[in-house]
Image: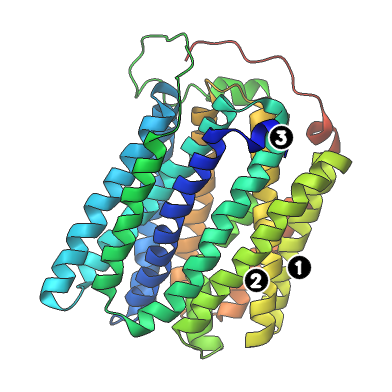
Amino acid sequence: MSNSIKKDVRLWMLIAANFSSAIGMGILSIGVAWLILEQPQGEKLLGIIMVVTTILIFFGAPYIGSLVDRFSRKRLFQLNQVFIFLIVFPIALFGYWNQELTTWQLLALYIASVIYYSIHYPTMLAFVQEIFDSKTHNRLNGVLEIQSQAASMIAGGLAGILFQLMDPARLLMAVAIGFVMSFVLLSSIPYQRKFIKRDHTTIFSSMFAGVPFIKQHWKICLSIFALTIPFLTLMVGNYLRPVFIQTTLEADASIYGFSNMIYSIGAVLAGIFIPIIYAKWGPWIASMLAVATYTVSLVFIAVLPFIGLFLFMQVLTGIGNAGSRICKQNLMMAHIPNAFIGRVNGIFEAVGTSIRLALLLAFTYALDWISVQTAFFITAILSFAGLLFLIKRKNELEAVPEARFEQSA
């Protein structure tokens, strides 16, 4: 990073706020998924709740994108911390008082965590593009990926240990404190919303205002969308992974927690090296390398189900998925105007979510007659298809961004 960025207080406050909330969300996501699996018919229940939340994201993504483009990104960050705190803390108190967490409470926590993430990431994308100079976006996306994954690495290690040693309700109380800290840190970030010409339409009518941009720039938009395929298959893998660990590897929650921690090591490596590759050899090489690495990891997981190899492959999974995400964010910030980035991203999310929903529905019921290894191999094939698409898209990925799309927000 340049010295000017290193001295920018906004960056360090943003990193600190994200770090605080990311540790809490990591512990929450890992712990709740495992506790759901321990319920009667836990595998089916986890699959169903993932399908339900995926449907919510499908319908909610364009609306969230419209919110991101219309309102203060800083305020949305803060409201997101308030939202998750108001869900987690009361449930933690109830669980502490009654000495247990009920199934419906676990499901509520899972749904809340999905909603939180669906607001957090598009807001972060637009916020960073808005307040930082475009020349710094590549390195900033790498730094923020390192921060996010370092927090996830800590959360994975803590979740794998603490959920074995502590009452879940007490742990959730501690998690809730992290959201309060994040809110306070976000409040300290100097921020002035940039003026955007508005078209006076309702928020619902503006939800799909990103579609004209996608039609006008469909080649680069398709290339950007191809970079979401690792993320889509990873989200399906979040359902497959605990089932794979529990049934195929016959391991316990500690392996699940450590797998998340090791994945984060790979993602941190991506945050360090993918921006360097992106800057030196361009977005096409960086994108190809990231998606290829991710695909290879899925093939080895599917073919050789050993605990040691599975954990090592999490490093490659982390490099591939995080690397493709950094490339995607760089390309979006370079090619999509800030006034529309929320809604364009919302369309990407809605389309990607429909694909994820179809895969989740298929795997939730197909696991009764196919193995988890076969399911992983299917996700590897999908990732390979994305790689083949990117191989033919060098011109679009290497092209200089076109003139900004002119339309009111």
The kind of residue on which mark 1 rests is Val
Q: Residue at x 49, y 16 (%)?
A: 194
- Which of discs 2 and 3 lies nearer the camera? The answer is 3
Image coordinates of residue 270 in percent, x first then y, are 71, 56
- Residue 231 in the figure: left or right of residue 192: right
Q: Circle 1 sits in a helix, a strand or a loop, which is it?
A: helix
The kind of residue on which mark 3 rests is Asn
Query: 167 or 236, which is in the foreground?
Result: 167
Q: Residue at x 49, y 40 (%)?
A: 13
- Residue 263 in the figure: left or right of residue 291: left
In the drawing, what numbered circle is on residue 296?
1
**What residue is shown with label 2?**
314
- Does the image show residue 389? no
In the drawing, what numbered circle is on residue 339?
none
Query: 187 or 399, which is in the foreground?
Result: 187
Q: Determine the image quadrant of residue 185.
A: top left
- Which of discs 1 and 2 lies nearer the camera? The answer is 2
Looking at the image, the residue that sits furthest to the right is 281
Give the Cα distance between marks 1 and 2: 11 Å
Q: Circle 2 sits in a helix, a strand or a loop, which is it?
A: helix
Image coordinates of residue 180 in percent, x first then y, are 31, 49
* Quadrant of the image containing the N terminus: top right
- Mark 2 vs 3, N-terminal side: 3
- Which of discs 1 and 3 lies nearer the camera? The answer is 3
Q: Residue at x 35, y 69 (%)?
A: 32
**What residue is shown with label 3?**
3
- Mark 1 vs 3, N-terminal side: 3
